[in-house]
Image: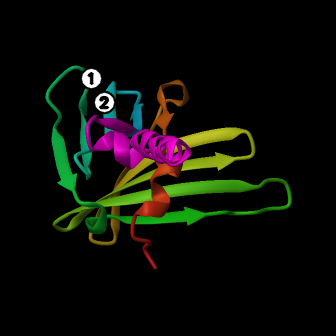
Amino acid sequence: MTNYRHILLCILSASLFSPIGLANTHTVTVFQCVNKNQKKVNISLANGQYIYQFGKINQKPDITMVRKPEQLAARYLTPKGDRFNGKIYEVDFRNGDYTYTVSSSYLDSKHIAHVDVYQKDKLLTSISCLPNTIVDNLHEHIFDLPSDD
């Protein structure tokens, strides 16, 4: 009987430290970076919802969107070339006619991240992240989100 309780306790403890388990009691950073204009992009997970924020560092965000996982679209791509292998993680936050696509790419040993902003299907701008500012945990969440097939 003690073995059973010990196993059950271990399973419950492990589930508390999963990204979703932690997000039910804490805010988890899914993605974050800063661009050359000192504006920060942040995706957090709190209370089972994803929060997208964009704005100047240490100021109130210019944009804040809160979405349930089923309201997002995600993609995982694995491009291969003659000289490289890659992994690309993308997640879309939609707001009316606008779509904010957060993209994180691992091409061999190079890590690139950016946010593309679309109005309908037209690309309005692409915001590149400074490499030394990237906090990227998209890979821990991407497969729990609806795919964009």
Q: Residues within 10 Å of mark 2 (few under 14, many from 20)?
A: some
The colour style of the image is rainbow
Q: Nearer the viewer, residue 128 or 107?
A: 107
Q: Which mark is on residue 79?
A: none
Decide: is 132 above or below 90.
Answer: above
Whole-number angstrom distance, CA of label 2 to CA of label 1: 6 Å
Q: Quadrant of residue 96?
A: bottom left
Horizontal relation, residue 144 to residue 7: left or right:
left
* Residue located farthest toward the right when viewing the structure as drawn: 82
Whether residue 57 appears in magenta in the rendering, the answer is no
Q: Give yes or no for contact between labels 2 and 1 (Cβ–Cβ under 8 Å).
A: yes
Q: Residue at x 35, y 37 (%)?
A: 28
Residue for badge 2: 39
Q: Residues within 10 Å of mark 1 (few under 14, many from 20)?
A: few
Q: Residue at x 68, y 39 (%)?
A: 110
Q: Nearer the viewer, residue 55 or 67?
A: 67
Q: Quadrant of residue 35?
A: top left
Q: Position of residue 41 (x, y in %)?
A: 33, 38
Q: Residue at x 17, y 43 (%)?
A: 63
Q: Quadrant of residue 43?
A: top left
Q: Residue at x 49, y 65 (%)?
A: 75
Mark 2 or mark 1: whose residue is earlier in sequence = 2
Which region is colored magenta?
Answer: 1-29
Q: Secondary structure at mark 1?
A: loop
Q: Position of residue 126 (x, y in %)?
A: 40, 49
Horizontal relation, residue 69 to residue 63: left or right:
right
